[in-house]
Amino acid sequence: MTRAQEQAIARVCAKECMQRELVEALKDCAGMLEAACMIIRDNDARAMAKESVAIARHVLARAKEQSA
């Protein structure tokens, strides 16, 4: 295997690792925001938070599909 091939493989592995870390961070953030929705009193802020959670869950579902 050439050095260029090794470097290309290393870049792909690093990118996949970063993507996994981002997915985990998004899961954590979505969970915290979902929990916060229960205590947010302002209706507009609660609606925005719920919409953000829905978007995050959609992105997570797409990421899961692509990794399968």
Image (cartoon, rainbow, N blue to C red):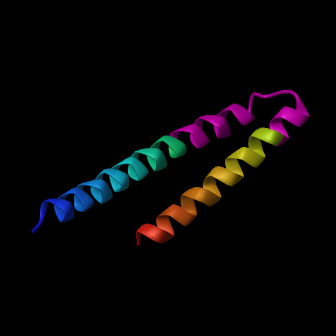
* Residue 27 in the image, given as x and y percentages of width and height: 52, 46
The stretch of residues the image draws in magenta is 28-47
User: What residue is drawn where x is 60% and y is 42%?
Assistant: 30
From this view, report whether residue 63 is shown above or below residue 19: below
Q: Is residue 29 magenta?
A: yes
Residue 60 left/right relative to 12: right
Name the residue at 36% across, 53% down.
15
Picture quarter with the N terminus: bottom left
Q: Nearer the viewer, residue 42 or 4?
A: 4
Q: Which residue appears at 14% of the width and 59% of the height?
A: 3
The answer to whether 50 is drawn above or below residue 45 in the figure is below
Q: Position of residue 9 (x, y in %)?
A: 24, 61
Look at the image and say whether residue 60 sits in the magenta stretch: no
- Count of picture labels: 0
Is residue 56 shown above or below 66? above
Q: Position of residue 46 (x, y in %)?
A: 82, 36
